Amino acid sequence: MENKEFKFNILFASIIITANLATAVLGGRTINITFLSQSRSILCGLIPFCFSFMLIDIYTNQYGFENSKKLIKIILLNKVFFALILFFIVMIPPTKMSADEIYYQTLAHGIIRALCAGTVATLVAFYINCHIFSRLLFRFNGKYLWLRCVVATASGEFIYSIISNTIFFFHKFNASQIIQLTFNNFGFKFMFEVVTLPLTYLLVYLLAKYEVSQVIKYKNFKPKHLDSNINISTT
């Protein structure tokens, strides 16, 4: 069963990786949104970021914690590779025809900074998110998808917000501004997760219907009252 080739594994992984890279490109741009008659400043990169967190929960639910850890490593490698490409390309002297060089330099440096912040945050937050989601999947025997998504995503996104905002806005904003932006961003992320739960259920249903079912091994979890190699179906 473990050696079967899944239909949508690569597609889901590619979308998650693309959303993460888009988060870095758009991450430094702040926008204002109005909610309950109050205007809040959030980072523009939150939109693709929230989709990536939603999808990685679905990915963990369908393909298991071990595959999610592999995907996290691939995401990190992609971010590092993307940052290195930008770093070395902008070091090449431009021609006289390159009138927008200052714009490109500023944009590239901002993206590189966002990639560095996102790489550290992803390493910690995505792992914690998938770990909590898988533990809850184990404990609830595959039930209560909404609770698993909300708890795991809220934990992972809060940690991600703290790490990425602190690194990215260090020496740009003061501590109170970073804290305010972090809580504003986290509030948007949490609201996004709750609002998109119907979409999460739809995608989980479609995967359960059209994807190959698998059995997840929790060899890295060792609850006292159960066998550490217990198998739980994702369907």
Image (spheres, rainbow, N blue to C red):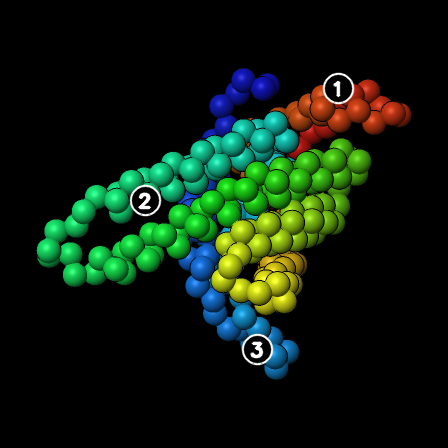
Assign the N terminus to one quadrant of the image: top right
Is tag 3's residue or tag 2's residue first in the polypeptide sequence? 3
Q: Position of residue 182 (x, y in %)?
A: 61, 61
Asked whether residue 198 is in view, the answer is no
Residue at x-position 10% and y-position 55%: 96
Q: Count the marks: how many?
A: 3
Residue type at mark 2 is Leu
Three-letter code for the amino acid on which mark 3 is drawn: Ser
The secondary element bearing badge 1 is classed as: loop
Residue 73 left/right relative to 230: left
Q: Is label 3 or label 2 in front? A: 2
- 143 or 79, which is in the foreground? 79
Query: Distance between the Cα atoms at labels 2 and 1?
Result: 44 Å
Query: Residue 177: which disc?
Result: none
Q: Which residue corresponds to mark 1? A: 229
Please identify the quarter of the rendering in which residue 134 is found. top right
Identify the secondary structure beneath mark 3. strand
Disc on res. 86? 2
Q: Is residue 85 above or below residue 181?
A: above
- Which percent across, then down, holds residue 228? 78, 21
Mark 1 crowdedness (10 Å alpha carbons): few <14, some 14-19, many ≥20: few
Q: Residue at x 58, y 33 (%)?
A: 68
Residue under pointer 3: 39
Amino acid on which disc 1 is placed: Asn
As drawn, the residue found furthest toward the front would be: 171
Measuring from the top left, give residue 188's x and y in whole percent: 60, 63
> Cβ–Cβ below 8 Å for labels 2 and 1?
no
Of marks 1 and 3, which one's residue comes earlier in the chain? 3
